[in-house]
Image (cartoon, rainbow, N blue to C red):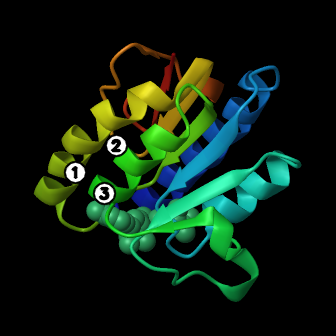
């Protein structure tokens, strides 16, 4: 499969899972966390499908399209390994949705990051809260969910507290 085809499959799955997550957390109170602002595409989509939800964004720095940048109060900048534990203290059981889009070109580094980050997310999830991610995140206290639209397992990941 060409890289273009694989990219298209990934973003289609991302879109379907985020839309499904927005439906599933309709009655789950709490804030939303976007891990990996990047260009800001998925942040922009989350803003659109979750009007009125407070969204906090994590990345090393802001490098997003100017139209897709959070204000300073909602940008938690620095390495995930420092900013996520700080957020866990700030938002105990107060997060309705975490979207993790943390992959880089380096597969081994991405897998190591996913293993480190996953347990840090557990204390933040509200009951019924979701983690939707590009990497498999083994978050304690969550159950894996089937993907929407008959997407094959492993194309994207969804777990629920
Ligand atoms: C795949 S991109 C996110 C793309 C974005 N969701 C979008 O739709 O445009 C991954 C982002 O995660 C960030 N990132 C990766 N590892 C990180 C780490 N350890 N700490 C903070 N940010 C990190 C990178 O800087 C990059 O912007």
For the residue pair 16 and 133, the one nearer the viewer reads as 133
For label 2, being within 8 Å of ligand 1 is answered: no
Residues at badges 2 and 1 in contact (C-beta under 8 Å)? yes
Relative to residue 124, is residue 117 depicted above or below? below
Determine the residue positioned at 44% across, 79% down: 61
Where does the image place residue 86, in percent across and percent down from the top left? 40, 50
Q: Residues within 10 Å of mark 2 (few under 14, many from 20)?
A: many
Q: Mark 3 — residue?
A: 82
Residue lying farthest to the right in this orientation? 52
Residues at badges 3 and 2 in contact (C-beta under 8 Å)? no
Where does the image place residue 53, in percent across and percent down from the top left? 80, 45
First-in-chain label (2 vs 1): 1
Where does the image place residue 107, in percent across and percent down from the top left? 17, 57
First-in-chain label (1 vs 3): 3
**Spatial CA span between label 3 and label 2:** 19 Å
**Which quadrant does the N terminus fall into?**
bottom left
Question: Which quadrant of the frame does ligand 1 lie within?
Answer: bottom left
Dot 3: element: helix
For label 1, being within 8 Å of ligand 1 is answered: yes
Q: Residues within 10 Å of mark 3 (few under 14, many from 20)?
A: few
Q: Mark 1 — residue?
A: 113
Q: Is residue 123 visible?
A: yes
Q: Which mark is residue 135?
A: 2
Q: Seen in the image, is 161 located left or right of residue 80?
A: right
Determine the residue positioned at 11% across, 55% down: 108
Residue lying farthest to the front in this orientation? 89
First-in-chain label (3 vs 2): 3
**Spatial CA span between label 2 and label 1:** 10 Å
Determine the residue positioned at 33% across, 36% down: 120
Q: Residues within 10 Å of mark 1 (few under 14, many from 20)?
A: some
């Amino acid at each position: 499969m060409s890289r273009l085809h694989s990219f298209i499959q990934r973003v289609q799955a991302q879109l379907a899972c985020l839309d499904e997550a927005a439906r599933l957390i309709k009655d789950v109170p709490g804030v939303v966390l976007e891990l990996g602002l990047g260009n800001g595409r998925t942040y922009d989509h989350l803003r659109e499908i979750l009007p009125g939800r407070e969204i906090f964004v994590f990345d090393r720095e802001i490098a997003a399209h100017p139209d897709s940048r959070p204000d300073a109060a909602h940008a938690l900048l620095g390495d995930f390994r420092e900013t996520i534990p700080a957020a866990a203290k700030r938002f105990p059981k107060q997060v309705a949705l975490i979207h993790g889009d943390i992959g880089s070109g380096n597969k081994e580094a991405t897998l190591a990051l996913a293993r480190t980050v996953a347990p840090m997310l557990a204390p933040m999830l509200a009951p019924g809260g979701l983690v939707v991610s590009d990497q498999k995140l083994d978050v304690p206290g969550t159950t894996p969910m089937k993907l929407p639209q008959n997407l094959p397992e492993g194309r994207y990941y969804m777990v629920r507290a």
